[in-house]
Amino acid sequence: MPSDPAPARAVGEHVEARVPEVLDAASPRARPGRRREGGGGEKGGGGAAPSGTVVRTEGLRRSYGDARAVRHALDGVTLTIEAGELVAVLGPSGSGKSTLLGVVGGLDRGYEGRVELFDRNLAKMRDRELSRLRCRQIGFVFQAFHLLGHLSVLDNVLAPALFDPEWPDLRRRAMELLDRLGLADRAEDAPGQLSGGQRQRVAIARALLQRPALLLCDEPTGNLDTEMAARTIALFSELHAEEGLTVLAVTHEERLAEVATRVIRLRDGRVEHDGRGKQGGRGKQGGQGKQGGQVEVGS
Ligand SMILES: Nc1ncnc2c1ncn2[C@@H]1O[C@H](COP(=O)(O)OP(=O)(O)OP(=O)(O)O)[C@@H](O)[C@H]1O
């Protein structure tokens, strides 16, 4: 285990000047025990199982280009994701997977159709409200890690919690997450000293720090070797079981799809398949593709 990590104030001095960047990059700023907005249930391990609808899309379309050459990255996607589902989103390159994450995470508002997050219509939310919802409820793991090079690994994980009064608990959780991701002995290192896969795991720990209601991941195991991919997938699966974490993960990783409760496959911006994963489903499934059964993975 590393030596005692820097106190909050020391991290604050480093991070303060870059707060918007830090918060944009990473941060579900919900506190353990805080009731989720919109029916997501209680946060925190050992609490009541989460319930309610986390994401609902109806006729979701996202288009690029102009009238002469329009391309629909998403073309009429209708689905409902209930709290506690672990959803793997598969599909060939260009099928709309990352676009779906961007819209569902409230990062891309240039869509048509209806999108609800925690039972709230995204189109009706002001930027400030949306940004608050994002910070409190959603953890993002992007393909780019957005780590701050001048902070240690541990401080990167803690950065989104800078103003959170639960700091001591979160520091313990940060170390626990790093440990579970095989990085406890690197907590004091700078991100520049880590491999791509290690940095990816730091970004994952950061996204999970404040127990988001919804974790959105774009290829979360894309840079990991076989053992670390397995360990990361196991962590998602464990947090899903322990904390009722809802996960929507774009992946090409067969094993991630194997621990999923549900697998959605996109093709050409449409839902080609929406069915139970091998671990079974918890909520109702609202895709317009084939339903039920186990799916073949790999595209
Ligand atoms: N900003 C953009 N401008 C124009 N076209 C875009 C933009 N973003 C995405 N697209 C197009 O939308 C389609 C879906 O892209 P998206 O990145 O969602 O696919 P993907 O399934 O995530 O692909 P990959 O597996 O390769 O990451 C692609 O045809 C892509 O070229």
Image (cartoon, grey):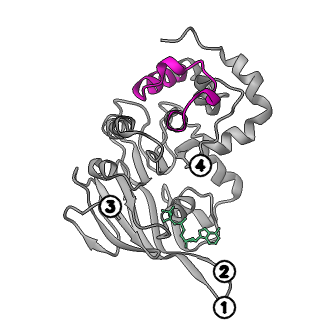
Magenta part, dominant SS: helix
Q: Disc 4 designates what residue? A: 133
Type of amino acid under label 1: Arg
Point 68% across, 84% down: residue: 66
Is 290 placed above or below 107 here?
below
Q: Is mark 2 within 8 Å of ligand 1?
A: yes
* Helix, strand or loop for disc 1: loop
Residue at 64% across, 30% down: 192
Q: Give the range drawn in magenta.
A: 170-198
212 vs 227, left or right, is: right
SS at mark 2 in the image: loop
- From the image, tell me which residue sits under label 2: 65
Q: How far apart are marks 4 and 3 (CA)?
A: 33 Å
The crowding category of the residue bearing disc 4, from other C-alpha atoms within 10 Å (few below 14, some 14 to 19, many at least 20), is many
Quadrant into which the C terminus falls:
bottom left
Q: Distance between the residues labelled 3 and 2?
A: 29 Å
Mark 1 = which residue?
68
